Amino acid sequence: MENEIKNYIEENIPELKGRLYPVFTTNISRTSVAYKFTSLSGGHLRQSQLELKIIDADYDLCKEIEDKLVNLLDIEPDEPFVVLNGVKFHSAIAGGGPLFNDACQRWEDTLYFIIDWRKINVI
């Protein structure tokens, strides 16, 4: 499921293609997004938390990327699930916010999404 959502973000927000990194990144010469998935529950309909940390020296650019990610992943409750390569998911924003990291002199704008998902049979 992680790869499907990562690919979904890269396909729908082209400026992030090749700029998404699992857990952390040391490549901060331009906008980067570190992502982390955490399992919350199992079963037929699973639930995971997706943390996205947008990293850039320009606060306004972080906010632009935030808007694009929220528009893509904050799915209205009455909208259908997104179907990707054997995974069906629905997500909603659950919090986040920006902070300035003095160590690397970059903004880190963190977003949290709750993802309800399940595997489906692909024929």
Image: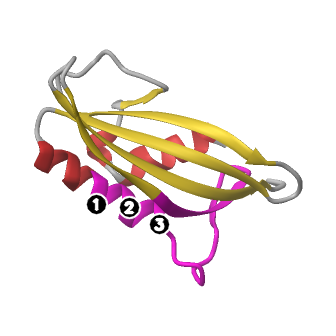
Any part of residue 31 in sight: no
Point out the image quarter for the C terminus.
bottom right
- Cβ–Cβ under 8 Å for marks 2 and 1: yes
Q: Residue 42 location, x and y as percent? A: 84, 49
Mark 2, secondary structure of its residue: helix
> Which of 86 and 31 lies nearest the eye of the viewer?
31
Q: Which residue is mark 1?
A: 67
Left or right placement of residue 113 versus residue 96 in this view: right
- Tell me which label, 3 or 1, sits earlier in the chain: 1
Point out the image quarter for the N terminus.
top right
Q: In the rendered structure, find residue 70 and report the number of the disc placed on it.
A: 2
Q: Amino acid at mark 1?
A: Asp
Q: In whole angstroms, how far apart are the C-alphas of marks 3 and 1?
A: 10 Å
Q: Quick check: 86 above or below 71?
A: above
Going 51% across and 71% down the picture, which residue do you hit? 75
Residue 83 lies in the magenta-colored region: yes
Left or right placement of residue 12 versus residue 112 in this view: left
